[in-house]
């Protein structure tokens, strides 16, 4: 999260000079080291699913005076601990079918999805790349693609739809599924009505949690996401929930049982349309539920243990062979794509090819070592008169531990070569002098009182090069054969008068004109009206992640201002506004408070004139 409460509280504290009353207890003052010890303790409790204990640890320092740089860490720890404690009321107990560990790089290839449908995300959809940018689920014939893309700071969910011969410009999926942190691995349910994805920034308990959003069939909009709760979400990283086409199984991945960060377990459970939720109060029971242990089977004999060891070596070899095959095929496709790629795309492809050229020998070396280890083990078994058929034993093992279930082994598809429309540019209507003038995209004047600078009139619309660099320039047909050219949109006579000299640099006879609700009025009448109406202002906040404000930022706004925070989205660009300031001084003072509380990209704008 990018914001903290510290600035806002410090600023408000300076406004009050009252001394503390006698007998008032002074809060404890903790050093950074003391705070970090407590937060580490809370994190340990969360990792053990003991959320009530984690909340208790955070509560111990809640009223203490702590260093400003620790306030964000404390707030986040308390939030994750409280969320986890609340989620203990909504636990489901699905029947576990199978679980198996795979490499994080390609675990998604073992899901029951269409073969050759996981592909490298094309640059037109995710130019900047970053973590989790390497694949998109894009089956043949789809009409809408929902995917995760990097905006320079976080990963958000976008969609693009097929229109005749081209894909639409990517747009953010919706406000509800957009947070201040990453959203990744979106997958639709078989009926297309539910969207499953992983997020770090929504209501969760740590790492990536799993969420489901339901589509409103009437409006086509995606609803507010719901955390899928235990055992699907956990204090660890949980990814890629999906439902098999026959609605029999649900799959998801997590690193909750993995020793490092380069692998995940893929869990398979029986799919429940409406799972029964219940409260689990014991941290031990919650941890056991979240391990998703397979049903107990008969204890293995000594011979069975040797079979398990043999099959472990065999599976490792098969996995390494598959990784080498997939990497080689992907590298061949990249080399084929070089001929038609742009200069920047070639650089990216060459970098990827170089990395794969380095990775494949490492994989091959691991394969050789695993093969020698298996051969040595086979010799030991043969010396005892034991011969193992790996195919037969794998089928037997699958039948006994997974009810006949086996993980698929998909292949990646060819790289996508798709044409995507460019997003419509957002036109800046502020008065400017540019190297070349620009016409307004929309000649409609806003309601209320507006001043403009009239430049000239002629029989036809002028060439942009003849506008003297002014922007925006509006045109209207005053009478047949007479096109009037005016510049700017100003709400006060003072503002238009201040900008008139800029226009007269190129158009010496330029003069001021006025309009009321789009109809011409004399400047004298406009100035009289201006005395009877009031100019109002708003504060605009542009989120650092380009999509949403963090919970801390929203809290900071509520501390310094009682006005409603409104989200606006224009051509995919998101901002938040606070309206209704009666004077610029009031708006400026509030903006300074917001900036002191840690928010950036805060500006004050006029909303025009209105009746008092």
Image: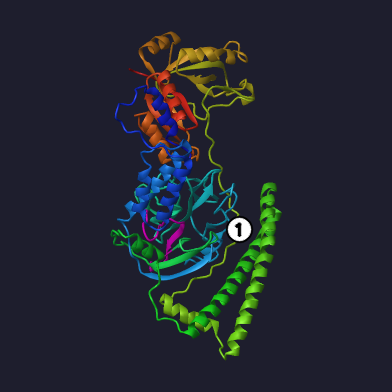
| Quarter of the image with the C terminus in it | top left
Is residue 247 within the magenta segment?
A: yes
**Residue 589 locus on image (x, y percent):** 42, 22
Q: Secondary structure at mark 1?
A: loop
Q: Nearer the viewer, residue 161 or 606?
A: 606
Residue positioned 62% across, 74% down in the render: 370
Residue positioned 59% across, 47% down in the render: 128
Residue 120 seen by the camera: yes
**Residue 377 locus on image (x, y percent):** 60, 81
Residue positioned 41% across, 39% down in the render: 552
Residue positioned 37% across, 48% down in the render: 57
Residues in magenta? 227-251
539 lies above or below 521: below
Q: Is residue 508 left or right of residue 452?
A: right
**Residue 455 locus on image (x, y percent):** 56, 16
Q: Quadrant of residue 134?
A: bottom right
268 lies above or below 496: below
**Residue 164 locus on image (x, y percent):** 52, 51
Q: Nearer the viewer, residue 261 or 240?
A: 261
Q: Is residue 274 left or right of residue 397?
A: left
Crowd rating for badge 1 (residues with CA inside 10 Å; few <14, some 14–19, many 20+): some
Q: Quadrant of residue 249?
A: bottom left
Which residue carries the number 1 mark?
415
Q: Is residue 524 left or right of residue 24?
A: right
């Amino acid at each position: 999260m990018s914001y903290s409460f510290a600035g806002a509280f410090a600023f408000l504290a300076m406004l009050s000079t009252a001394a503390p009353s006698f007998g008032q207890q002074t809060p404890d003052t903790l050093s950074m080291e003391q705070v970090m010890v407590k937060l580490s303790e809370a994190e340990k409790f969360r990792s053990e699913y003991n959320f009530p204990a984690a909340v208790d640890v955070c509560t111990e320092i809640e009223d203490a005076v702590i260093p400003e740089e620790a306030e964000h860490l404390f707030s986040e720890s308390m939030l994750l601990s409280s969320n986890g404690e609340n989620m203990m009321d909504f636990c489901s107990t699905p029947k576990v079918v199978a679980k198996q560990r795979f490499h994080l790089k390609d675990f998604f290839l073992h899901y029951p999805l269409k073969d050759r449908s996981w592909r490298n995300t094309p640059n037109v959809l995710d130019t900047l790349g970053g973590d989790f940018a390497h694949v998109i689920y894009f089956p043949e014939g789809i009409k809408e693609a929902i995917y995760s893309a990097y905006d320079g700071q976080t990963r958000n969910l976008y969609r693009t739809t097929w229109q005749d011969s081209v894909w639409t410009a990517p747009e953010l999926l919706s406000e509800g599924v957009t947070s201040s942190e990453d959203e990744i691995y979106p997958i639709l349910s078989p009926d297309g009505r539910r969207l499953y994805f992983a997020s770090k920034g929504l209501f969760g308990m740590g790492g990536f949690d799993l969420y489901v959003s339901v589509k409103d069939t009437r409006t086509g909009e995606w609803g507010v996401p719901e955390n899928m709760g235990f055992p699907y979400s956990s204090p660890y990283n949980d990814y890629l929930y999906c439902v098999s086409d026959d609605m029999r199984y649900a799959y998801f991945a997590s690193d909750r049982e993995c020793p490092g960060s380069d692998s995940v377990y893929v869990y398979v459970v029986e799919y429940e349309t409406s799972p029964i939720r219940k409260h689990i109060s014991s941290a031990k029971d919650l941890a056991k539920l979240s391990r998703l242990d397979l049903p107990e089977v008969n204890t293995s004999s000594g011979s069975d243990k040797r079979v398990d060891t043999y099959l472990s070596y065999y599976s490792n070899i098969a996995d390494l062979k598959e990784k080498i095959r997939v990497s080689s095929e992907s590298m061949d496709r990249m080399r084929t794509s070089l001929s038609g790629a742009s200069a920047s795309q070639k650089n990216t492809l060459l970098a990827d090819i170089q990395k794969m050229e380095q990775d494949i020998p490492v994989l091959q070396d691991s394969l050789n070592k695993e093969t020698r280890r298996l051969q040595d083990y086979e010799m030991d078994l043969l010396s005892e008169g034991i011969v193992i058929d790996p195919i037969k034993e794998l089928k037997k093992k699958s039948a006994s531990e997974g009810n006949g279930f086996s993980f698929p082994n998909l292949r990646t598809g060819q790289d996508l070569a798709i044409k995507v429309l460019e997003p419509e540019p957002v036109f800046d209507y502020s008065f400017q002098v540019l190297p070349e003038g620009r016409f307004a995209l929309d000649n409609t004047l806003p309601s209320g009182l507006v001043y403009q600078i009239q430049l000239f009139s002629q029989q036809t619309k002028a060439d942009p090069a003849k506008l003297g660099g002014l922007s925006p320039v509006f045109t209207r047909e005053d009478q047949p054969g007479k096109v009037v050219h005016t510049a700017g949109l100003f709400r006060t006579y003072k503002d238009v008068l201040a900008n008139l000299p800029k226009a007269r640099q190129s158009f010496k006879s330029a003069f001021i004109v006025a309009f009321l609700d789009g109809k011409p009025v004399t400047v004298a009448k406009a100035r009289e009206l201006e005395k009877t109406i009031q100019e109002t202002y708003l504060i605009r906040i542009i989120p650092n992640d380009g999509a949403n404000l963090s919970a801390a930022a929203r809290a900071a706004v509520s501390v310094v201002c009682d006005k409603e925070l409104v989200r606006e989205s224009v051509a995919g660009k998101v901002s938040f506004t606070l309206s209704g300031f009666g004077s610029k001084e009031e708006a400026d003072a509030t903006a300074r408070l917001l900036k002191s509380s840690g928010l950036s990209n805060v500006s004050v704008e006029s909303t025009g004139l209105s009746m008092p």
